[in-house]
Amino acid sequence: MAYGLLKGKRGIITGALDENSIAWKVAEKAHEEGATFVLTNAPIAMRMGEINKLAEKTNAQIIPADATSIEELTNLFTQSQEVLGGKIDFVLHSIGMSVNIRKKIPYTESNYDYFMKGIDVSAMSFHKMLAVAKKLDAINEWGSVVALSYMAAQRTFPFYTDMADIKAMLESIARSFGYHYGLEKKVRINTVSQSPTKTTAGTGIKGFGDFFDYAQAIAPLGNASAEDCANYCVTLFSDLTKMVTMQNLFHDGGYSNTGVSDYVMKNLGVSGEE
Ligand SMILES: NC(=O)c1ccc[n+]([C@@H]2O[C@H](COP(=O)([O-])OP(=O)(O)OC[C@H]3O[C@@H](n4cnc5c(N)ncnc54)[C@H](O)[C@@H]3O)[C@@H](O)[C@H]2O)c1
């Protein structure tokens, strides 16, 4: 059911690689809610061609941009305003990549060139995107920017290796930039800390399948799906959440506030009953 929450709003959606991508679902929901937007991804990701299907379905234009390049981001924000006919109202940062994870390198033996690459792609890109938008004055007042994060920024999840530190930086950028952009232009910046989700980035993590089941067994509502995440992002892009900024918002079925569940206790054989 659509509510017209984004009617008349213009956006930029990064990170839709295939139909499992969280960004893909966000684009579908934003379209349903009446938004017009540009889709973007790294030029190398375009080669898969999947994004064309999404563009067709949502009447969106595609503007490739490597999110680590100020030049390409400047082109993205400039062209998006031309294509959409005005300033931007919402931006989704849905970009994550760790070479250390990809190469299955243990956290304590992290390769620092890979670590730097992970920081640049997954966290610094957020700062660059915001800096470019601010410099061009490309986002409308009360506009909303959302980046996707994971709870390893607060608590240790060993398999998440260097991405844990990188997500901590991403969330910090939302607070720091959110202050300045809010004060000067009333632009809102938040991160959504999402449940484990079966996507290319997610399933690339060693032991992801087992952890997905564990999180499902802990969270009272179960894991939040990519569709659920898309719905939440749409509310954050809408005027209904106008005063929410500089927050890290858990979207995880209650996982982050649950110590242990009855289900896990029972299955470990430690139900506590004498
Ligand atoms: N899947 C999960 O379990 C999960 C949980 C919490 C948060 N997240 C976060 O959600 C976001 C989206 O990931 P996803 O799970 O949908 O996976 P995904 O693999 O579908 O999306 C990651 C995207 O990042 C893009 N990307 C990589 N390098 C880039 C660059 N240099 N410039 C521009 N784009 C680049 C990829 O092309 C891809 O589209 C990431 O930030 C991820 O960390 C995922």
Image (cartoon, rainbow, N blue to C red):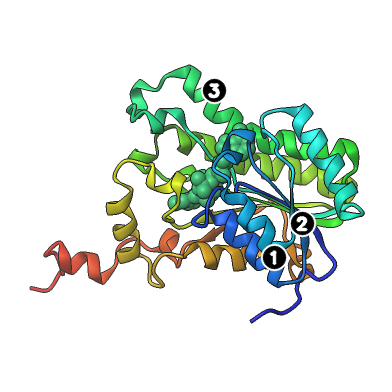
First in sequence: mark 1 vs mark 3? 1
Q: Position of residue 110 (x, y in %)?
A: 39, 22
Q: Report how far apart the C-alphas of labels 1 and 3 lie in the structure.
A: 33 Å
Mark 2 and mark 1 in contact (Cβ < 8 Å)? yes
Give the quadrant of the C terminus: bottom left
| Picture residue at 60% right of the left edge, 28% below the top | 120
Residue type at mark 3: give it.
Met
Per the rendering, the mark at residue 116 is: 3
Amino acid identity at mark 1: Ala
User: Which amino acid lies under the numbered mark 2 shown in the image of this protein?
Assistant: Phe
Label 1 vs 2, first from the N-terminus: 1
- Given contact means CB atoms under 8 Å apart, are the residues at marks 2 and 3 in contact? no
**Which residue carries the number 1 mark?**
30
Side of 215 relative to 145 (left or right): left
* Residue 37 disc label: 2
Q: Secondary structure at mark 1?
A: helix
Asked if residue 72 shows in the view, the reply is yes
